[in-house]
Structure formats: structure tokens, C-alpha cells
Image (cartoon, coloured by chain):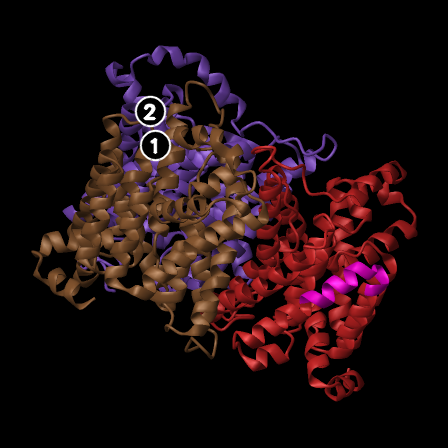
Chain colours: A purple, B brown, C red
Amino acid sequence: MDWSLSIDKAIPRPLRVIFRGVGQVFFCCNAVTGLIFLIALYVGGITAGIAATVGVISSTVAAYLLGFSEDDIDAGLYGFNGTLVGPCLFLFLENTPQLWLYVVLAAVLSTVVLAALMRILQPYNIPASTSPFVLTCWMFLVAVYAFDGFSRGPVLPPPGIPADIAAASVVSTEFAAFTQASAEAWYTAIAKGIGEVMFADSIIVGILFLTGIAITSLRGAFMAFSGAVVGVAVPVLLGADKTLIEMGLYAFNPVLTMMAVGWVFLKPSTGSAILALLAGILTIICQAGLASFLAPIGLPTLTFPFVLVMWMFLFATSKSKYWGNA
Amino acid sequence: MDWSLSIDKAIPRPLRVIFRGVGQVFFCCNAVTGLIFLIALYVGGITAGIAATVGVISSTVAAYLLGFSEDDIDAGLYGFNGTLVGPCLFLFLENTPQLWLYVVLAAVLSTVVLAALMRILQPYNIPASTSPFVLTCWMFLVAVYAFDGFSRGPVLPPPGIPADIAAASVVSTEFAAFTQASAEAWYTAIAKGIGEVMFADSIIVGILFLTGIAITSLRGAFMAFSGAVVGVAVPVLLGADKTLIEMGLYAFNPVLTMMAVGWVFLKPSTGSAILALLAGILTIICQAGLASFLAPIGLPTLTFPFVLVMWMFLFATSKSKYWGNA
Amino acid sequence: MDWSLSIDKAIPRPLRVIFRGVGQVFFCCNAVTGLIFLIALYVGGITAGIAATVGVISSTVAAYLLGFSEDDIDAGLYGFNGTLVGPCLFLFLENTPQLWLYVVLAAVLSTVVLAALMRILQPYNIPASTSPFVLTCWMFLVAVYAFDGFSRGPVLPPPGIPADIAAASVVSTEFAAFTQASAEAWYTAIAKGIGEVMFADSIIVGILFLTGIAITSLRGAFMAFSGAVVGVAVPVLLGADKTLIEMGLYAFNPVLTMMAVGWVFLKPSTGSAILALLAGILTIICQAGLASFLAPIGLPTLTFPFVLVMWMFLFATSKSKYWGNA
């Protein structure tokens, strides 16, 4: 909205670039939105907040030092992958002092990977989105498993489900019939679904994220909300694990897919809204498939289902007479 | 042949597009050939026939609704991946009423994936071929495994060998020496090898497929036949499992590779025929490798060995002074 | 150096192309350097030497017969992948007479894969480097596992660690504290690290390789040496297995990465030297990650960590105002 963009411009440049970097996690090139996201992250947990701050600063400074496009840096494009790298490594790895070093190194690498993917995708005019974050974190997770595993030989770690998620499965019996469950269960799952985009298992964080998106765009907020609804309703229909659904772990990917397809990258229309719905549903199937594929290696899917489905739909629509120009 | 193309043009447009879609499984843009293939599928099994019909219609209608190139749709290019999706899902998944929903959804997705890959490969002038069918079916297979597996945790399914294939291993002792086997064993393996391109474990279906190809092109039929011979002879020489050989499960990939390299995509010459033979032999090695790679996840190779080797040879020949223009 | 290039030009053309092919393993388009490498290979082991010779001749002749660019063939670009294929297959597969057939077939295939990847990477002006060797050898290794595995069902082979490496683990207790270890341990690890680029577990071979590189370029030799130091120091700091470190198995990838980034493909400067150091460190992390990922399939990483990191850095720097032109 106009007033928020006026504030955005009034913020001193270094701070603005960092806040926009956080905002770009949800495609919002808006420092006010980014600031709200950052506050929400600290509300969700002080460590996650600091990790995200270290990540966004490291990746943005790296982009500046490596001489990448000033316009891209200014828009926060070299910030959002670093933002995600921080909380991700703290969720999936043991909290040791040297983890801070890994966060800095991974955030720097995410900037290199982003520039590389931007170059590869340049002829197609397709965004790299969060793929650098996913690829970098996967590499660091398997590398840490590998170094830790040397003393005990080539034994693979158990699937990378953090302890708090595993513990939550105790409550799963409460959801014997999610379809008949109270409005509260739906409300929890939808809010957490938006929060889990940045690894926050918290209702209040999800609501703050949605508020921040709404400040930038109401259509964007509507798509994020619809994505979360799809990410709860479709797994319920397909009979997926109720605990995972309630934690929003099926919803964060369709949230991003529907925002990308229904708001950011295609002309806003009824047609693109229907396409976004289809893309959201397919994201659930893709996530289930990828999770099954990655389970033996002990890696989480992160936001790769969103990236794959978004790429498919953006490449495909560029061949369509309705959306593309090919 | 000329008479068949006259009939092709006389068939009403919607039917022609559907028949051509089936014909394109073997690179034949010819409604007469496609109709023979479809009849053969029904001969092989009524369910497989209906599944293929539902698939080809779904994927073609989706391409029309999404606004993709009319010329491509008319040539049946948006039909053959859907044709393959149908029988594939019925072979590898449990036959339930909701499977028909999956077939429609997967056929629609195969159209989106095809358009995306056509856009990616456009600068290189290389065909996507059956890769959308393979990628879509892999995603649906692992997704269904994942949803079914929630109650029993992250246990992986056994390698995806359908029951009828497993049962056939009883007869394997009969082939103590396939090299010295009767002409009948070779005849069976070669005919089934052509049939298995559309998942038909049947001699008569294979012969009907070959007849259909011959109506479009004798060189095409010769390449298909040669591919099946390579797909029997090479695994015999390398000492592969006799049952799999006799069922044609090593032959359907080289059939497609030799048709693509020796007939469709390179100028027909003695040189391209020799290259097709080399490509056919490498397809066997690639298939054995990929099968070994996919076994822990329980996925079949489908036609991906053909796709990989064909891509390698078409990309490579475009750099050659004999075939390419680079 | 000038005198070596004069000798290079004086060598009869067929021999020169073959020697240059061997030289290109370390990016040296210089027949004198290649001849020294080849002699070093024979010093390391007569079988490895012959296998490399068969490989380089097969891949170069295949490129000539398939009609690929004469200039590329002349520069030895169609030789180095074949050179690596030979000793690789002899290290990881059982030494049988038919293995020589596999070496020829794999070397020919590496030429086809190289031409294909050159075409794919052409719009980006990025080299394929040793990726054809890696992809071809992976395919042959899993294929041989698959054919050998038919009689005993879908059992996976143990991780592909050759017997001599396994035996070496007896000495690992000697390295209780590598950081405090004698200068000799460092010297051994660094020299073998350079030797292992062509699978030679030998100090003298490593020294001969470094000498050969120095004849072509002192900066190249400095980068190779620095890469080997990084490939020993970083794993020691991260607490990796001491035996693998001393054998140089962490060092051969950063050797190639630092040569590529710090000497061959970027403008030589202090900036590119720092970038090479960063790339070298990330190569170690990437190798640990990839090794962990490939362990269940029983495949070695070969030089793929180098290829991945080099690609990332070359794609990324093409977007930078300091190095690129995008």
C-alpha cells in the first residue's frame, strides 16, 4: 500500500535493503513488511530471529562484495535466501558455537548459488526463487551428517525430523477425524502453515506474516491464505498424517506456490487464480513424493516442492497464448 | 504411406487429434496408425485401453484449455504422454475408483510438464519426448507410496515389480541357455519388447504396434524391429535375467531410441543407422544403471533410459559436421 | 613455458593430440606436460597407464569419426575424459578381459556426452570439464553392479571403496593428532592429493604431475598446490577421517577447483585467487555432502564436487561486475 512504500523509501538505505531482503521471503519488496516479518521471527524465538538476521546480512554483504547487480541487491533479492538459511540450520542441526560460522558460510554460498541460477535461468526470464536456500541447506545438512558419521562408518542418520516435531505426534490421536474437527484445529493449521514458511511453529507468527503481506498486497495475502487452506484441506482428503497437517507442514509450500502463480509472476486474473489453485494442489502431491524420495537420506523437502511446481507452471504458461509470449 | 494419410485427413478433427496423440507414442503423426495402436491396447486388456483413452483425452483437452499451440495439439503432441500415463498408473498402483481421478490429474499435469520442457529445450531444438510421462508418473507413484505409508512410518515399498512379472520368474529355468533357445523364444521376446512400450505383455499387441508403425513408415518399423532385437541380444550377451529378457522388459527402451535416432530426428542415412545401433546398445547399459539406482526407492525406469540416451545423441550430433548445424 | 610449447609444436600431430588430451586433465593444452603425466601414470602402475592410454585414444578417435570440431580435437578437449575413464574403471571394477571392452565403450560414450554437454552449455560459455567422465563412469559402475546383481536379487553393493583403501585404515591410529603430525604426513597427503586426480595413490606420481603443470604455468602449479593444502587443512579442522585425508582423497577435488577458478577460467588477479580459496573450501563441504548422498548406492563422488562448485562459481561470476560481462 502507498503509505508503507513511503515509509520504505524513508528508511536509511542499508536498513532498507536488509528489511526488504526479509520481505522477499514472501515476494514483498517492502521494508515495512520485512520489518514486521523480522519482528515476528523474534517473537517466534530469539535464536531463530538472530539466525535470520545474521543470514540476511551475510548474504547481502556477500552479494555487494562479489560485485553483483546493485539493483537486485537494493530490491532485497540477495537477502531472502540468507534469511531462510539461518533458522533452517538451527532447526535441523545441533546448536553449537561453530553453527554460527556455518550459517555465515551457507548464507554466502546461497548468494553465489543465486547468482549462478539467475544466469542459468536468464534466457527464460524465470526466477530462481528459494532454490539457492534449498540447495545450500541440503548440501550443508548432508555434509554435517557425513563429518559426524566418520567415526561410526557409513551409517545413515534417521530422517531429519526435529525433536519437537516428533514429540508432537503424541497429540495425533486428538485428530481422529480432522474433517469433523473444530474450527480451532483448522485455524491453528492454517496460521501455522503460513508461519512454517520461515520454520515458525506458531500461530501468532503466522498471523503477523499474513498481516505483513497484506500491507504490501491484499491479493498476495488472499493467495497466501488460500494456499494455507489448500495445504490443510487436500492432505485431509488424501488421508495424510494429522499431526503434520496441524503443524502446517503440508501448507507452507502451497502458500508460496499460490502467491507466486496467483499474484507475483502471472497477470492477475480469474484464469491465473484457477491456475494457482491447480498449482497449489499439485504442490501437495509433489511434496509427498519428494519427501518419500528424500527420506532414506534423511533430508527434509524444505521449499523445493514449491520451487519445482512454480518452475513447471511458469515455464508452461510462457508457451500459452493466454499468459505467455512465446 | 499415402493412402493412410488420406484417411487421416478425412477423419473428423477431434477424433483425428486423439488418434494422432496415440500414434505419437511411436513418433507417428498419423490417425490410422494411432487407431490401430488404440485397438491393440484394447486387445491387450480392456482396462488398459480405457485408461489410455481417458489419458489421451484429458491431456489433449488440458492443452486446449491452457491455450498451448494449436499446431502442436493438432499434431497429437499433447496426447502421447497422457496415453502412457493411463496404463502406467493402472499397472503400478492398486485398482481403486479414485485411481481414475489420479489418471486424469496426472494426464493434465503431463501436459503442463510437456509445455514447460518444450520451453526449456526450445533454444536447442530438442524434443521433450516421453520425459513428461516419466516425471509425472514417478511423482504420482512416490506420492501414493508416501500417503499409503503414513500409518506404517517411513518404510520403503519393495521394488515396483508388478505381481504378474514376479510370477513369471517361475518359467526362468526354461531359459538355461537363451542363446541356444528356440526361434520361438526370440520371437516372443522381440514382439513383447515392442508391446511393452505401452505396458502390454502380449505378442499380438506387439505385432499390431509394428504393423501400425509400418503403415506410417517402413524405415520406422525396421528401426523398431532392430531396437527389439538389440534389446534381446545385448542383455543375453551380458548375462541378464532371462525372464525379464523374454518379457521384453529390456527391449522397449532401445525400440524407442533406435526409432528416434535412426528414423525421426536425424537425416536417414547409413551413418545415422550405425549411430542408432550404438545408441540402442548404450540404452541397455543406461537402463541397467538407472534400474539399480531407482531400486531402493521402488520406482521403475519407465522410458527414461530412452529419453536420456536420445537427448545425449541429439545434443551431441548437433555439434557434428555430419548431422548438425552448430 | 615457451620452450615446452616449441617442443609441443614439433611433435607429430597424432601423438601431439593424444599427449595434449592427457595434459587437459589438469587444463594443460601442452603435449610436453601431457607426456610427463602419461609417464607418471605408468610409474604409478602399468595397468593404470595402459588403461589411460586406451581411454585417451578411444575417445579422441571417436570424436574424429563422429565429426566433432577439429579445433577442439586438436586442443585435446576430446581426450581428457577418456584418459580418466580408463584408470577409474580398473580401480572400481574387477579386472577381467572384458573390462578392456568396457573401457573402450565408456571412452567413446564420454565423447558423445561431452559433445552433448558442450551444446547445452554453449549459450552460457561454461566448460563441461570432467562431467562427461563422471556421468559415464557412474552409469557403467551401476550398470555392472546391476548385471552382476541379478543372481542375488536387488541387494546393493557395499560403498565403492577399493580394497587397498580399506586396508590402509589400519594405519589410521598413527594420526591421532594430524594437526600435530610431522611435516612428513602433510607432505604425503599433499602429494598424493595431486596424484589422486588420476587415481594414483603415490607420492612420486603427485610430484611428477605438479612438475608437468609447472612446465605449462607456474600460477597453475601454485593453485594446484594450494588446492592440495586446502584439501588437507580443512578436513583436519572439520575432524574428518585421518586415513582418507592422508591418502589425498579430500584433496583432489579442491586441486582442480582452485586451478579452474584461480588460473584457467577467470582473469588472474588477487580477487580471483581469494575466490579460488573460497571455492576450494566449499568443494570440501560439497564432497562430504555428495559422498553421504551417494553412499547408499555405492558410488564414489569422483570429481563431481569440483564440477559442481566450478559451475556455480563460473555461472555466478558471469553476473559480477568484477569478472563477468552479463
Residue situated in front as seen by the camera: B281 or B158: B281
Queried whether the magenta region covers residue A260, the answer comes back as no
* Residue B187, horizontal then vertical, whole percent: 40, 48
Please, which chain is the residue tagged with disc 1 on?
A: A
- Residue A21 is left or right of residue B130, and the answer is right
Q: Earlier in the sequence, mark 1 or mark 2?
A: 2
Residue named by callout 2? A189
Distance (Cα) linking label 1 and label 2: 8 Å
- Label 2: few (<14), some or many (≥20) within 10 Å? many
Report the residue marked by disc 1. Answer: A251
Q: Nearer the viewer, residue A241 or C316?
A: A241
x, y percentage for residue B264?
Answer: 34, 65
Q: Quadrant of residue B212?
A: bottom left
Could you tell me if residue C34 is visible in this image? yes
Q: Which span is picked out in magenta?
A: C42-55
CB under 8 Å between discs 1 and 2: yes
Q: Position of residue A180 (x, y in %)?
A: 24, 14
Within 10 angstroms of label 1, few (less than 14), some, or many (20 or more) residues?
A: many
Which image quarter holds the C terminus of chain A?
A: bottom left
Q: Is residue C43 magenta?
A: yes
